[in-house]
Amino acid sequence: MRFLTITFTLLIVLLQYPLWFGKGGWLNIISLQKQIDQQVKINEKIKSENDVLMAVVQDLKHGSDVIEAKARYDLGLIKKNEIFFLVISNKN
C-alpha cells in the first residue's frame, strides 16, 4: 500500500512538472505576459511621439505660420521693415 501511494505521488509530481516549469508552463507564461505588458507600454509611448511628429509634419505641409516661426527661431530670420533687438542678459 505504501509503495502504491509513493508511486502515485511521484506520477502526480511528474505530471505537474511540465505544467509549472515546461516550455508552456505557468511560470513561462507569467514571464511572457510581463514582457508583453512592457512592450505595450513602449509601443504606446512611441505611438504618442509619432502622433506629435505627424502633427508637426501636417503643420509644415499646410501652414505657412509654422514655417515662418521655425525660420525665425532656428535661423534668426526677420521680415522686411522689422527691427531686430538683441537682448543680452548679464548673469553672473
Image: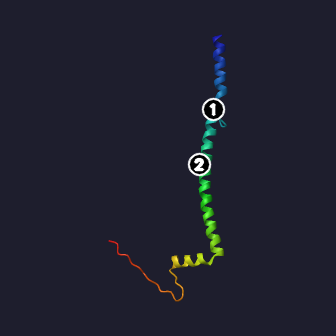
Few, some or many residues within 10 Å of mark 2 (<14, 14–19, 20+): few
Q: Secondary structure at mark 1?
A: helix
Percent position of residue 67, x then y: 59, 77
Q: List the residue tagged with mark 1.
A: 20
Q: Quadrant of the N terminus?
A: top right
Front-most of residues 46 and 4: 46
Percent position of residue 45, x then y: 59, 56
Front-most of residues 31 and 13: 31
Q: Earlier in the sequence, mark 1 or mark 2?
A: 1
Q: Secondary structure at mark 2?
A: helix
Q: Would you say the residues marked 1 and 2 are in contact, meaning their CB atoms lie under 8 Å apart?
A: no
Residue at 65% across / 15% down in the picture? 5
Percent position of residue 80, x then y: 54, 88
The amino acid sitting under disc 2 is Gln
Q: List the residue tagged with mark 2.
A: 38
Depth check, mark 1 against mark 2: the one in front is: 2
Q: Residue furthest top?
A: 1
- Decide if residue 38 is on the left or right side of residue 83: right
Residue at 50% across / 86% down in the picture? 82
The amino acid sitting under disc 1 is Trp
- Across the whole image, how many numbered discs are drawn on residues? 2
Front-most of residues 4 and 60: 60
Residue at 57% across / 79% down in the picture? 68
